[in-house]
Image (tube, rainbow, N blue to C red):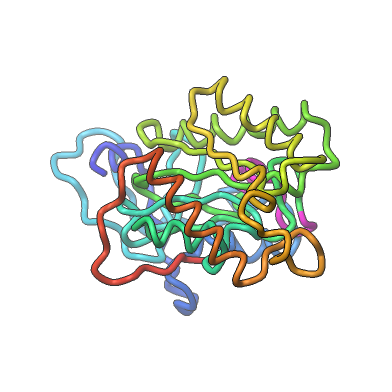
Amino acid sequence: MRALAAVVLAVLLLAAAPAVRPDPGAGGTAGALATGSAVPVEALPAPAVSWPVEGETAAPAAPAAGSLVYLPRTGRMMSVVPGVEDSALVIGDSQAGPDTWVGLGLEQAGYPAIIRGAIGTGYVEGNGSVAGYARALEAHQWLLPWGTPRLILLQGGGNDITHPASDIRAEALRLIRGLRQSYPSVRIVMVGVIGDGTGPRSEVDRVLAAVAAEQGIDFLTPGNWWARYGLNGRLRPDGRHLSPEGHRIAAGVFAHELARMSPPAIPQTIPHRAVS
């Protein structure tokens, strides 16, 4: 935290707005969500507190939850979220909500989840209000949490099935580069596209597996889980999303598979729910 503080110029306190959520970065800024466009750092509130770049003699007090922190090294505005050091930062689509197989699976594995995700999004695909993953972060539509997460989980790609493999690969690499710049020491796990192991969803899964291998990132494929675990009968009428029972079953599988790849998280005495 002290190393990060050395490059922080300002903490922007959200004193004028009511504390309707502990994590303002989950939905980005109001202007970004309203227009689907970028919100430049200059358009955000003026700094309330300045920290020197050099000459720090002691670590400053931690910013208050709900504050914003600007890091000039990365050009990112970040949100202050309690407990980030014990949490998994999740970037994903509608499969990554607090009551999905991803959110519930992380909870079972002992990771509070800080979620940056939206329905209909992907590495390339946007939903009209939020852009693809890397672009949404660069545009401050989502804000990364300030500090050092225990784990970064990249999920999704099912909404990218209409895009060329080259575009999916390019945007996945763009996201990974940005995250490594912000969190150089944090382990990244990429989760592929859940499905029955055939068709366009499986093709995107293979593209992401290749990206992960190229970048030295752990890859967890749920590519055939619908068929392997009998989840085809637990899909909603749209044929793409699991029912609550399907999410519950897949969550247990996901927690088990993640535990095989990663050291188990510190057990939590009080169950944590994902922040959305």
Asked if 28 appears above or below 189 in the picture, the reply is: below
Q: Nearer the viewer, residue 256 or 37?
A: 256
Quadrant (top left/top right/bottom left/bottom right) for the N terminus: top left
Asked if 120 appears above or below 24 in the picture, the reply is: above
Q: Residue placed at 69% from the left, 41% from the top?
A: 123
The quadrant in which residue 165 appears is: top right
The quadrant in which residue 31 appears is: bottom right
Q: Position of residue 170 (x, y in %)?
A: 70, 28
Q: How many marks?
A: 0
Q: Residue 133 in magenta?
A: yes
Q: Position of residue 241 (x, y in %)?
A: 71, 62
Q: Position of residue 98 (x, y in %)?
A: 52, 66
Of all residues, the one furthest to the top in this rendering is 214
Provide the residue span drawn in magenta: 127-139
Q: Residue placed at 66% from the left, 44% from the top?
A: 224
Q: Position of residue 251 (x, y in %)?
A: 51, 59
Q: Residue 134 in magenta?
A: yes
Q: Nearer the viewer, residue 260 or 177?
A: 260
Q: Residue placed at 55% from the left, 55% from the top?
A: 116
Q: Is residue 233 left or right of residue 83?
A: right
Of all residues, the one furthest to the left in this rendering is 57
Q: Residue placed at 62% from the left, 30% from the top?
A: 209
Q: Is residue 193 left or right of residue 127?
A: left
Q: Nearer the viewer, residue 229 or 235?
A: 229
